[in-house]
Amino acid sequence: MRAHRLTLPLLAVAFAVIAAPLPGGAAEPGPELEWVEVFSPDGTITQTAVPRAFEVAAAPDEVDADVVAVQQTGAPDQRFDLVFVGDGYTAAEIGIFHSHVVSKWAELSAVEPFASYKQYFNVWQVNVVSPQSGVDHDPTLGVARDTALDMGFWCQGRDTQTERLLCVNQTKAGQFAALAPGSDQVIALGNTAKYGGAGGGVATAAGANDQAGQIAVHELGHSIGGLADEYDYPYDRHTGGEPTEVNVTADPTGSKWAGYLGRSSPDGGVVGAFEGARYYRFGLYRPTENSIMRTLGREFNLIGRDAMVEAFRARVPELQVGR
């Protein structure tokens, strides 16, 4: 590995709040609350409303870290750049952080279509050093640690009902991620073995937990493939128009993916039209019974996988030859 040090002269963009995007027309939880995507150990994905985070950015002179190329296969504008930042890793624990990054990348790149296209990814590791080891509220609510990115379970105490909700200061995480030569998706790993994670502009996962890497797979379905969530929580009936994402529809016949109907899908199902998708129990339909966009640990369905491949081809010049 070759490490190089980069510094960030100023913060050019503010990262989005932690909430996953809501469908058009859905009621917002209120100005004091925001939606956060929650991942359960059994793979179930839901959303919960938590008090909105008020994040303080790090001073520019504090944003300084070694950037390591875990995998570099091309120029950032011709590749997908995946950036891992860590929290709760002291200077003596950067080697542990590296092992967590390598493990999560191996888990992600074993899932199709990443397995077939992993040579078109750059993977960067930003060695964020924390004064103390671990994350807040681990092992119990109320435990506080001095860390660089303010990660903590129970969404930093903002949601005392959901222990596994591992939240991060997204503004700070984005500042450090911007040190990498390119950044299409940021994943913040916490120095903990306790299961946890959250979705949003910066996905989070427990670095030492073997199950938590599936969160990154799901989040890249959003950021690369533009895929919608296929789970049906928290709303009842959709009464709006046709969604723009390729993997959800308001048409119960599934005509949006007519060319796929009846075909076997990599997630183990057969393509049809299954009611319940994009946060609604009724009125929206997904292509298969249970894909990674509905439950962690699953494969992408056929529509989702093809959308991911098309996104790869649109971004990578080598894949555009002969199209």
Image (cartoon, rainbow, N blue to C red):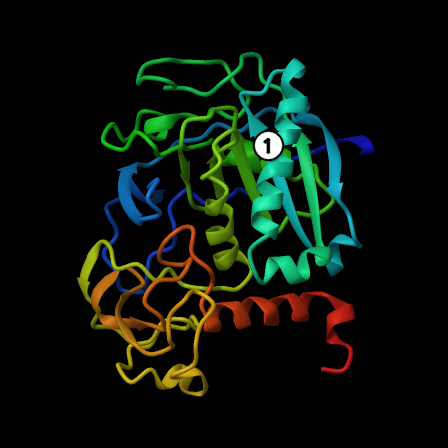
Horizontal and vertical percent for residue 277?
29, 65
Q: Is residue 28 left or right of residue 19?
A: left
**Residue at (40%, 63%) from the top-left corner?**
228
**Residue at (30%, 77%) from the top-left corner?**
273
Q: How many marks?
A: 1
Residue 238: name its quadrant: bottom left
Q: How packed is label 1: few (under 14 Cα within 10 Å), some, or many (20 or more)?
A: many
Residue 164: name its quadrant: top left
- Judging by the rendered image, the residue that carries numbered circle 1 is 100
| 277 and 235: which is toward the camera | 277
Horizontal and vertical percent for residue 119?
73, 56
| 64 and 294: which is toward the camera | 294
Q: Quadrant of the C terminus?
A: bottom right
Residue 65: name its quadrant: top right
| 198 and 292: which is toward the camera | 292
**Residue at (60%, 72%) from the top-left corner?**
310
Q: Is residue 119 left or right of residue 99?
A: right
Secondary structure of the residue carrying numbered label 1: helix
Asked if residue 11 shows in the view, the reply is no
- Kind of residue indicated by mark 1: His
Horizontal and vertical percent for residue 18?
41, 42
Considering only vertical position in the picture, is 253 above or below 145?
below
Q: Quadrant of the N terminus?
A: top right
Horizontal and vertical percent for residue 47?
29, 47
**Residue at (36%, 54%) from the top-left corner?**
295
Q: Is residue 311 left or right of residue 158?
A: right
Asked if residue 208 shows in the view, the reply is yes
Which residue is the extreme one toward the left? 236
Considering only vertical position in the picture, is 261 above or below 301?
below
